[in-house]
Amino acid sequence: MLADRIAKGLSERFKIPPPPTIAANLVGKTQIAFSRFQNLEPKRENNLAGGVEDAFSFCSSITATRFSRVSIAGRVQSVLQSPGEAYLFDMTARTEISLDEKFDNIRFYIPRASIDEMSYEKGIRRIGGLHSKYFGQQDQILHRLAQVLLPAIENSTEVTTAFVEYIALATFDHIIYTYGGSPRGNQISGGLSPWQLRRVCDFIEDHLSDDPSIVAMASECGLSMGYFSRAFRSSTGMTPHQWIIHRRITRAKSLIPDPSLTLAEVAILCGFVDQSHLGRSFVRATGVTPAQWRRERLPGK
């Protein structure tokens, strides 16, 4: 799996524990990975140089830090990294950084082939590569994506596939136009047709206890992932991930009062990982615990 490979590679190169990593598989062989990339134990040495790879990575800092030495293709500099700045690395170039300071980043890993495939899906020309105005340019959109990803990376077992895919699509959309030099055209903002909305909502209900993906939802409607995501939000006011959580909570509300079901069984039937996951999600949505919801609906109450 991509997430395991990325985590292992970062661990070996930077002499850190395998960082928490999640990944998305989109159209074709399109992949992207997100890691909580941090060094908590400074060392008086540089990272081990990795092999050349036809991919790009972005680092968006969570905390400010200073790298006394950053060497990219033989060009050496010191870098003061601040939150809100995006650091783009072309992984075909040999790169080394000092490990003598603590750092904490969200790292975006994107194979070049994935950029080409997503560009094709969007109907735009193939991108020759990604280029930033300068190393560490301000990028509040990438920073915001990193902030949204942080809790998801740290609690990956509770994250829906649709959430990771939605963030992946947003990331590709941003970097292709911001760093790929492609002009941003007018995106159609219409919603789904009535039959498409009925079909995808029925599909989600039928697979609520599973982990329905945007790939599968878009296929049900005969649409590309990007178009489907925008159209679904236009029609429902929610992202696919938000709709899934909304429907899981709605189902849980109807099942919790059933005394023949334990709360652990309700959790599984609604697609939550376990009873604790149900409890946290239910409190966020309703302000009460599942147990309180059940007690308030006992006969005679």
Image (tube, helix red, strand yellow):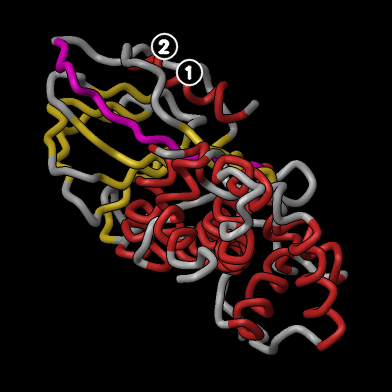
Residue found at x 56% / y 68%? 246
Instruction: Say if mark 1 contacts mark 2, CB within 8 Å.
Output: yes
Q: Is residue 131 visible?
A: yes
Q: Secondary structure at mark 1?
A: helix
Residue 49 x/y as whole percent: 39, 15
Extreme-front residue of the structure: 300
Q: Residue at x 35, y 16 (%)?
A: 17
Picture quadrant of residue 97: top left
Q: Is residue 273 left or right of residue 101?
A: right
Would you say residue 37 sits in the magenta stretch? yes
Of residues 55 and 300, the one drawn nearer to the viewer in this rendering: 300
* Residue 70 vs residue 37, the one in the foreground: 37
What's the amino acid at mark 2?
A: Glu
Residue 228 appears at what percent x and percent y?
A: 72, 72
The residue range painted magenta reads: 31-43
Asked whether the viewer can see residue 181, the reply is no
Q: Residue at x 78, y 80 (%)?
A: 197
Q: Is residue 58 magenta?
A: no
Instruction: Say which residue label 2 marks.
Output: 12
Alpha-carbon neighbours of circle 2 within 10 Å: few (<14), some, or many (≥20)? some
* Foreground pick, 111 / 262: 262
Please name the amino acid that badge 1 sits on. Gly
Q: Nearer the viewer, residue 93 or 176?
A: 176
Q: Which residue is mark 1?
A: 9
Q: Tell me the quarter of the picture where residue 203 sits.
A: bottom right
Label 1 – label 2 distance at C-alpha: 5 Å
- Please give left or right for residue 250 compared with residue 43 in the image: right
Give the x, y percent position of residue 176. Answer: 55, 61
Give the side of residue 83 with respect to residue 122, left or right: left
From what the image shows, is residue 221 above or below residue 231?
above
